[in-house]
């Protein structure tokens, strides 16, 4: 099947989020993608130092999610939409999974927060596996996928063929310009993407914003650790790749012996 990763510019508002979401969904459909994933906290936008993001109300977030469901159903494509979310009195960083029929299948919480996020969100506590059009996948969000490989191994050991990894790296204000994927002089992020795929023998699909000074780009990594597709640095758009799920065996992940570390 074909999977798509969306690299939108940083949104100016929830309305802007939905404009780019619908545009990039249509671009993915033109390339026959069956599922598309967006960057971390895309609605209303990650609270980065570069950009002022107003905290959205529960009603605003629910309204936005309803609109995303309508876009999924209208375009017959599954959507992974990372967003802020209220669960009772908890304020969470999640990735909602929506079927091609527009049904919310559930969400994955960000369980390992970056230390700078402790005063923004409450950490989640559960991991989930999802299935869309026969594709089994997990989700790990930014910091936890880069620095907590256990989050990916859990999914691989539970038969995930792909782990989607919404994130944000880089800046629109300052930094260096990367021109070559996986360059030894670049930050470690793309090397971590490679390892998450390779050490688990599954596909790893890491997706971020299009920013002026990116520290990594949206990338689809095969089970052997090779980058099979990535978005050009600094360019908004979608990257689509056909994946062979028979190669996503989870072989190395399933050889893990947890009893040795008890």
Image (spheres, helix red, strand yellow):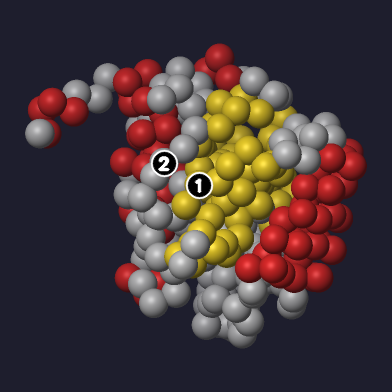
Q: Is residue 64 left or right of residue 49?
A: right
Residue neighbourhood size for the residue with mark 2, other residues' Cα within 10 Å, grouped as few (<14), some (14–19), many (≥20)? some
Rendering coords of residue 123 (x, y %): 38, 60
Q: Earlier in the sequence, mark 1 or mark 2?
A: 1
The residue where tag 2 is placed is 127
Q: Which of the 4 image quarters holds residue 259? A: top left
Q: Is residue 91 left or right of residue 1?
A: left
Give the residue displayed 44% in from the left and 74% down from the top: 120
- Circles 1, 2 touching at the beta carbon (< 8 Å): yes
Q: Is residue 11 left or right of residue 136?
A: right
Rendering coords of residue 113 (x, y %): 37, 62
Q: Is residue 242 left or right of residue 106?
A: right
Residue 108 — which label?
Answer: 1
Rendering coords of residue 241 (x, y %): 69, 34
Q: CA distance from mark 1 to mark 2?
A: 6 Å
SS for callout 1:
strand
Foreground residue among 76 and 33: 76
Q: How many marks?
A: 2
Foreground residue among 123 and 52: 123
The C terminus, quarter of image: top left
Residue 63 seen in the current view: yes
Point out the residue furthest to the front here.
88
Give the residue displayed 64% in from the left and 20% down from the top: 134
Residue neighbourhood size for the residue with mark 1, other residues' Cα within 10 Å, grouped as few (<14), some (14–19), many (≥20)? many
């Amino acid at each position: 099947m074909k999977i798509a990763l969306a690299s939108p510019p940083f949104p100016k508002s929830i309305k802007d989020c939905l404009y780019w979401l619908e545009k990039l969904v249509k671009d993915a459909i033109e390339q026959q993608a069956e599922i598309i994933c967006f960057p971390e906290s895309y609605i209303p936008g990650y609270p980065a130092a570069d950009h002022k993001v107003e905290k959205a109300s529960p009603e605003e977030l629910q309204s936005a999610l309803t609109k995303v469901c309508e876009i999924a159903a209208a375009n017959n494509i599954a959507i992974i939409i990372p967003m802020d979310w209220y669960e009772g009195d908890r304020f969470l960083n999640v990735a909602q999974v929506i079927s091609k029929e527009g049904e919310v299948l559930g969400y994955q919480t960000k369980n390992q927060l970056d230390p700078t996020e402790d005063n923004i969100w409450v950490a989640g506590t559960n991991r989930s596996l999802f299935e869309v059009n026969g594709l089994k996948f997990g989700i790990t969000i930014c910091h936890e996928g880069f620095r907590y490989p256990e989050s990916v191994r859990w999914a691989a050991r539970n038969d995930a063929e792909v782990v989607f990894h919404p994130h944000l790296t880089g800046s629109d204000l300052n930094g260096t310009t990367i021109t070559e994927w996986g360059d030894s002089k670049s930050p470690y992020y793309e090397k971590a993407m490679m390892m998450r795929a390779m050490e688990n023998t599954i596909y790893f699909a890491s997706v971020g914003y299009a920013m002026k000074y990116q520290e990594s780009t949206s990338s689809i990594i095969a089970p052997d650790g090779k980058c099979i597709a990535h978005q050009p640095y600094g360019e908004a758009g979608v990257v689509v790749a056909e994946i062979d799920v028979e190669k996503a065996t989870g072989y190395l992940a399933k050889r893990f012996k947890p009893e040795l570390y008890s």
